[in-house]
Image (cartoon, grey):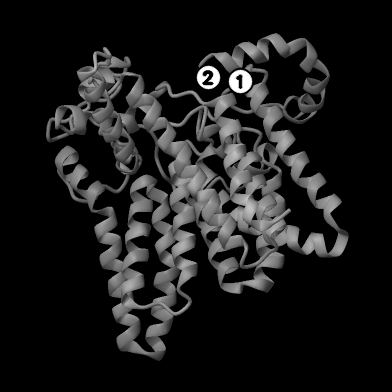
Amino acid sequence: MRGNRHPGILLGVWVAVLLLLFRPQLHGMDTVAYYAWLRATVIRGSLDVSEEFIRFGYGGERGLSPTGYRINEWSVGPALLWSPFFLIAHGLVHLGNALGIPWEADGYSAPYRILTALGSALYALIGLELLRRLALRIASPAAALWGVLTAWLASPLVFYMSAHPFMSHAVDFFINAGFLWVWTRWEKPTPLTRLALGWIGGLAAVVRYPNATLLLWPALEDLRWALRAPREGILRLLSLGVGAWIGFLPQMIVWRVVFGAWLVGNPYGIAGAGTFDLRAPHWLEVLFSTNRGLFPWTPIAAFALAGLAGPLRRARPAWARLLLAQTSAQLYIVGSWSVWSGAAAFGPRLLTGLFAGFALGLAALYEAGWRRWGMRPVLTLSLGAIAWNLILLARYGLEDVPRMGPVPLSTLWLGQLTFIGRALGELDRIRQALLRQFP
């Protein structure tokens, strides 16, 4: 298999996933809240999302802020990245109206939903291709491809880029992949490249607040460099900070308008939607709980971490240090939140961004395994992990596993095997599930 065919393989699988799972529908508080920023700004020219919340039945769930705006604690990053697709849809709707097509220019009609949802899926695809190209620096084309495919199809990403695209997770994966791409491109940073990296890191924090930890690692690099060359190190650090401020500025502006403050420590706390206790993080639960824990729901993550700590650390020590540190930081932050499981979720959705780094860990692991044991064990592991996740996704869609809360280990793991035996009897339900909206 030639490496120049691999982008086509990614694209082909991406199309197949969308044909099976694509659901451009808004459902659930989170999706409405993310989308409300976009719709309210473009259609009504306002940051008051009361109209959007009321439309979906959430008008009474959030009070008013001190400045009189409806409280929306969700970040504005997804709306920013969706905006090109939404604006294209807006133009198409007006063009369609001129041609006699009765689309409503209300921000809710089919063109808006379809193109914005496709935006999430497209961002995921771009992130996957960036990672594949990055993995080529540490692995053969085949190992790079399979590492990326597995990190995608054996993780929550496959669900959140298609069946639930109005969540932030596909965009989160993309921005994490983009950060890694930019950070690794310049082994000898300059103030200009640090400005760009800071901007992407700031934007990553606007997509999902905990992503601010991405900026810690280049900042530590610059501080260390400042001990050798103070002028250059400090200039790089200042450039990183300015870039981060520019990238995060849209969120600060929204907070200023809606909450009356440029910086808000815990927006979710304002709405009573969750608290943070940094003194008692739920480390073990985030990793091992059957309530959306990382390893029980996505076992391939254990192999990815082994790849980061082993083969990748030997091949690219700086990459491994950053990715392992970022994984630890995200586990700590997620574990410190009172809603660490992500509530209703397919797998550990709050950790979806980490699978950008996990793709590199798997590529490095596969390259080492390929050389030592050959292709068969690697492909067996990869295909087994993908099959596990897709079976679990089918069960989730059929509510064979609960949509939220802990799942008995026997139901979660042994149920995977029994479901295979029951699959023939479930074909009609599976077909109906593929034709209807995931709730």
Q: CA distance from mark 2 to mark 1?
A: 6 Å
* Position of 239 relative to 412 (above/below): below
Q: Disc 2 vs disc 1: Cβ atoms closer than 8 Å?
A: yes
SS type, badge 2: loop
Mark 1: give few (<14), some (14-19) or many (20+) Cα within 10 Å.
Answer: many
Upstream in the sequence, badge 2 or badge 1?
1
| Residue 100 pos. (x, y %) | 24, 13
Residue 94 visible? The answer is yes
Q: Is residue 28 left or right of residue 304?
A: left
Name, please, the residue furthest toward the left: 67
Give the amino acid at mark 2. Phe
Q: Which mark is residue 416?
A: none
Name, please, the residue furthest toward the front: 99
Q: Determine which residue is flagged by label 2.
A: 438
Q: Residue at x 55, y 49 (%)?
A: 128
| Residue 388 pos. (x, y %) | 73, 34
Mark 2: give few (<14), some (14-19) or many (20+) Cα within 10 Å.
Answer: some
SS type, badge 1: helix
* Position of 116 relative to 375 (above/below): above
Give the amino acid at mark 1. Gly
Q: Is residue 215 left or right of residue 340?
A: left
Q: Determine which residue is flagged by label 1.
A: 397
| Residue 338 pos. (x, y %) | 46, 38
* Position of 141 relative to 393 (above/below): below
In which quarter of the view is residue 319 placed? bottom right
| Residue 424 pos. (x, y %) | 79, 14
Q: Is residue 190 left or right of residue 153?
A: left
Q: Residue at x 49, y 23 (%)?
A: 23
Number of numbered callouts drawn? 2
> 143 or 344: nearer the eye?
143
Residue 336 visible? The answer is no
Q: Residue at x 48, y 61 (%)?
A: 181
